[in-house]
Image (tube, helix red, strand yellow):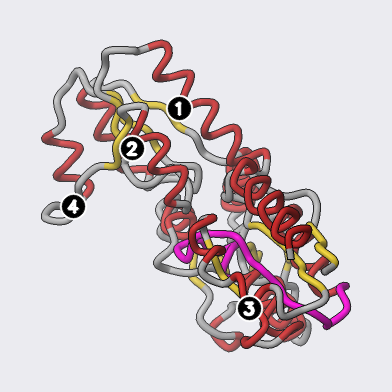
Amino acid sequence: MKINLIKPYGFCSGVQNAIDLVMAARKENPDACLVLLYPLVHNENVTNYLKQQNISVADLKDKSVEEFLKEISEDSIVIFPAHGHNQKWQKILEERKIKYFDTICPLIKENIFKIKQSLAQNKKIVFVGDEKHLETQSILSINNQIQLFEDVNSIPENSTMCFQTTCDTNKAKLVIESCSKKQNIEIINTLCPVVENRLNQIESLESEGLAVVIGDKTSANANSLYKAAIEKFGSDKTLFINSLEDLKKEEVFLLSSDALNIVSATSTPTSLVDDIYNYLLNLNNDW
């Protein structure tokens, strides 16, 4: 069986940067209570690893974020996730003089800067993203003049359009094409190039064999890769896993093909991809 590992794989630089910042915060504050306001990135493996470092995710089941931040002990340290955060949360911490670390992805930070520049020029902003995703929520919290994209008809003329970094590239293309008939619509490419690259690599593959997508089902990026893999290989020839244990349950299925293509989300640990790849190599040799 031919095993094709799509490269680059594992963490993107933004995810690695977030993890490095959190681990540096733990090293600088070895005895402090470090609390992640939300999962640092959308991958259970990363969340579990940080939990082992005594860095846990806030329990927000019975209270709002605002209530949690107003009640948290003043000697705690809050970690904002890589996807961004609502601006009013930061204000609460600053008013209470509670220390925090911001692990926002540098690309999202750059996009926020571009959006603020456009707002300063009195431009209307239309943001294309998932309203339930933290990145989208953080962008919308910048200014109430930022409009969430609903459909082409709702886009005002003479406006600027931006995208969630992990927005499905096919959806983005369709939106851009639909806007071509509108007057004076400025498109700012705020899509993540790493995500685009991995999606493009799936599309360039021969539609033979099987596909294994390694990522968390809560990850927008992982779901986009899974969708692209299904479109290329079919749902009956595509696996969506997030652990070596998940893979082992599918050994017979995997060995039924002459070719296997492996792709990973940007929040998937590089070490996990290595473990899965090496396991498949050994499995292939033993078969």
3D distance between C-alphas at marks 3 and 1? 39 Å
Q: Which residue is mark 1?
A: 22
What residue is drawn where x is 38% and y is 42%? 48
Task: Tell me, yes or no, whether the two marked residues, 4 and 2, touch with CB atoms within 8 Å.
Answer: no
Q: Which residue is mark 3?
A: 253
Q: Mark 4 or 2, which is nearer the eye?
A: 2
What residue is drawn where x is 50% and y is 60%? 216
3D distance between C-alphas at marks 4 and 2? 14 Å
Residue 187 appears in the figure: yes
3D distance between C-alphas at marks 3 and 4? 44 Å
**Earlier along the polypeptide chain: callout 3 or callout 2?**
2
Task: Tell me, yes or no, whether the two marked residues, 1 and 2, touch with CB atoms within 8 Å.
Answer: yes
Q: Which residue is mark 2?
A: 36
Residue 188 appears in the figure: no
> Callout 3, which amino acid?
Phe
- Magenta span: 204-223
Percent of width and height locating residue 123: 61, 59
3D distance between C-alphas at marks 3 and 2? 38 Å
| Image quarter in which the C terminus is found | bottom right
Q: Mark 3 or 4, which is nearer the eye?
A: 3
| Image quarter in which the N terminus is found | bottom right
Instruction: Please give the label number shown on residue 64.
Output: 4
> Callout 1, which amino acid?
Val
Q: Is residue 69 left or right of residue 179?
A: left
**Earlier along the polypeptide chain: callout 1 or callout 4?**
1
Q: Mark 1 or 4, which is nearer the eye?
A: 1
Q: Is residue 193 left or right of residue 120?
A: right
Residue 273 higher or lower than 26, as above or below: below
> Callout 2, which amino acid?
Leu
Corner quadrant of residue 172: bottom right
Q: Secondary structure at mark 1?
A: helix
Percent of width and height locating residue 61: 17, 56
